[in-house]
Image (spheres, grey):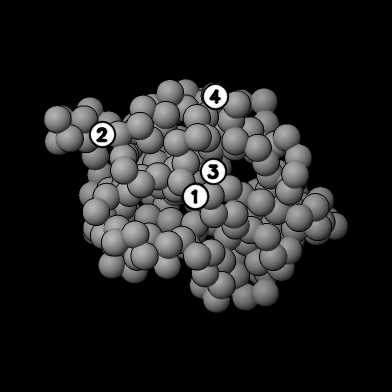
């Protein structure tokens, strides 16, 4: 059984948002089309409390882009983003949320970030996504969304590690690219770990 996972299609990751991904909004129509083609569709939602320790503003003296040690994890300092209940944490207004069967919130613990849709970065706390997919007999997972080099990457790496046959729908993702080339390197890393990289066109052909 196949499922589609839409990663973090939220206002703050769109142009004009707090942590904007270039062209992030351009994948929304594709995400809506993909969601209409899959029998099972889930989404992740970055969902931080105001005092989240991944925010530079909560670490005096730290600037956005700095890397700190946060409770044993390497942590990039981000602008405050996806704060629970705020507009920035909402899904893009054009995303057809009626096509989502389940939403998994992550990054709720202020002391640890959660890039992956499956676990906190310290891998101690599952979000429930793996259980939910297994209960639905999903063994093939197609992933797209934002951002290629962070939440999409870690979600895909966890998916293969958990035994799902995993695809990255490459043209339905966009990256942050703090360093030039980060997204391309992330895709290579996913490929090396066993994630199949496909385009939405190839997927469309294979589904026809
Ligand atoms: C993300 C940085 C911080 C993402 C979330 O969705 O890729 N990146 N929080
Ligand atoms: Zn975040």
Q: CA distance from mark 1 to mark 2?
A: 24 Å
- Give residue 8's mark: 3
Is 177 positioned to the left or the right of 33 in the image?
right
Q: Which residue is mark 1?
A: 102
Q: Nearer the viewer, residue 41 or 188?
A: 41
Q: CA distance from mark 1 to mark 4?
A: 18 Å
- Give residue 123's mark: none
Residue found at x 67% / y 25%: 16
Q: Give the number of the mark in front: 1 or 4.
A: 1
Helix, strand or loop at disc 1? strand
Helix, strand or loop at disc 2? loop
- Residue 145 image position (x, y, % from top left): 45, 39
Residue found at x 47% / y 27%: 28
- Give residue 94's mark: 4
Q: Give the number of the mark in front: 3 or 1.
A: 1
Q: Earlier in the sequence, mark 3 or mark 1?
A: 3
The answer to which image quadrant residue 181 occupies is top left
Q: Are marks 1 and 4 in contact (CB under 8 Å)?
A: no
Placement of the C terminus among the 4 image quadrants: top left
Q: Earlier in the sequence, mark 1 or mark 4?
A: 4
Q: Earlier in the sequence, mark 1 or mark 2?
A: 1
Helix, strand or loop at disc 4? loop
Ligand 1 has an atom within 8 Å of the beta carbon of the residue at disc 2: no
Circle 4 Cα neighbour tier, 10 Å, few/some/many (<14 / 14–19 / ≥20): few
Q: Are marks 1 and 2 in contact (CB under 8 Å)?
A: no
Q: CA distance from mark 3 to mark 4?
A: 14 Å
Q: Nearer the viewer, residue 205 or 22?
A: 205
Q: Does 54 sit above or below residue 71? A: above
- Residue 40 image position (x, y, % from top left): 35, 46
- Give residue 199's mark: 2
């Amino acid at each position: 059984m196949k499922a589609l996972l839409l990663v973090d299609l939220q206002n703050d990751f769109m142009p004009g948002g707090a942590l904007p991904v270039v062209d992030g909004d351009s994948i929304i129509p594709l995400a809506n089309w993909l969601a209409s083609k899959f029998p099972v569709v889930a989404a992740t939602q970055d969902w931080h409390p105001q005092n989240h320790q991944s925010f530079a503003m909560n670490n005096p003296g730290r600037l956005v882009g700095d890397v700190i040690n946060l409770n044993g994890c390497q942590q990039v300092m981000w602008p405050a983003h996806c704060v629970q209940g705020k507009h920035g944490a909402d899904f893009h207004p054009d995303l057809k949320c009626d096509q989502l069967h389940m939403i998994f919130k992550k990054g709720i613990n202020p002391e640890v970030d959660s890039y992956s849709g499956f676990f906190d970065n310290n891998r101690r706390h599952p979000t429930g996504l793996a259980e939910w997919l297994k209960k639905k007999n999903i063994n093939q997972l197609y992933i797209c969304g934002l951002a290629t080099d962070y939440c999409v990457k870690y979600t895909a790496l966890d998916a293969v590690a958990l035994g799902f046959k995993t695809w990255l729908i490459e043209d339905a993702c966009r990256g942050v690219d703090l360093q030039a080339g980060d997204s391309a390197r992330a895709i290579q890393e996913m490929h090396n770990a066993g994630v199949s990289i496909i385009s939405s066109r190839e997927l469309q052909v294979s589904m026809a």
